[in-house]
Image: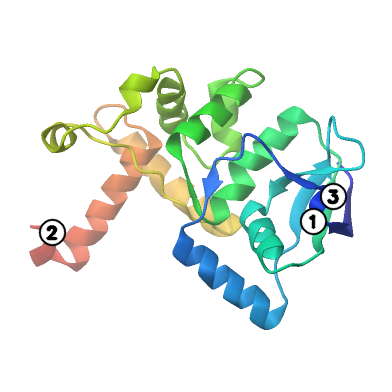
Amino acid sequence: MSAALQDIPTDRLVPHPENSNRMSADMLTKLRKHIERTGRYEPLTVRPHPSQEGNYEVLNGHNRLRVLRAIGEGSARCIVWDVDDDQARLYLATLNRLAGSDIPERRATLLESLLGAFEVAELSTLLPDDRGQIEELRRLSRLEPEDLVSKSASERKESQVPVILDFVLEEAEAKEVNLALDMIRASAEEGISGSQALVELARFYLIRCRPDEAA
């Protein structure tokens, strides 16, 4: 994969149609104020557009592009990556998890596209999601539109809605966390997932450090 830093006119930048990341209005306002005040922002990550000659497709930085256009900037600093469609989808599913938040249905559709080229087990090693989250998002992507409407309050109380946590670790820290989770999974009487092991780790901390609150 090759990469190069360029200033590209904003009218030549096209958001990837499968982007699932959205930032709240409050966060967009803060981002705009920061860029207006400092003129600094992380370069957008783009690739040569696969079907529009002379244009570029945005893989990471959709919200920054919105702000730059809103304040009248004619160009954006971009890192240009020469990647194919499958690699582009992988970057969409990873880079865009570092800011803003995902719309579950759109992220599910993105992962469904990735599952056409990768197995669930392989994707779980490439993305922030564990295997259980990927399978749940795949199930979500296959629901009919009427199944996605909001449930009543009583129904919501009875159902458990998956929540995706976002955090980034240094490699050494990640090894320590994974080792702890592996130890918890190995000691469990019944097989548990990585996410369940993380919950057990959190419970252990709460009971040890704040026994009155955890009781």
Comparing labels 3 and 2, the label whose residue is closer to the camera: 3
Residue appearing at x 53%, y 42% in the figure: 128
Q: Which residue is mark 2?
A: 214
Question: Is the N terminus in the top left, top right, bottom left or bottom right quadrant?
Answer: top right
Quadrant showing the C terminus: bottom left
118 or 53: which is nearer to us?
A: 53
**Type of amino acid at the residue the image marks with label 1:** Thr
On the image, numbered disc 3 is attached to which residue?
A: 80
Q: Are marks 3 and 2 in contact (CB under 8 Å)?
A: no
**Circle 3 or circle 1, nearest the eye:** 1
Q: Tell me the CA gap for discs 3 and 1.
A: 14 Å
* Residue drawn at the location 69% of the way across and 81% of the way down: 38
Residue at x-position 55% and y-position 23%: 112
Instruction: Please state the horizontal and vertical placement of residue 39, each as a whole percent of the image.
Output: 72, 77
- Identify the residue position indicated by label 1 in the image: 10
77 lies left or right of 19? right
Residue, far bottom? 37
Amino acid type of the residue tagged 3 in the rendering: Val
Question: How far is the residue under mark 3 from the one under mark 2?
Answer: 49 Å
Q: Nearer the viewer, residue 194 or 70?
A: 70
Q: Secondary structure at mark 1?
A: helix
- Identify which amino acid the numbered label 2 is placed on: Ala
Residue 107 position within the rendered picture, expressed as x and y whole percent measured from the top left: 51, 35
Per the model, the C-alpha gap separating discs 1 and 2 is 51 Å
Callout 2 secondary element: helix
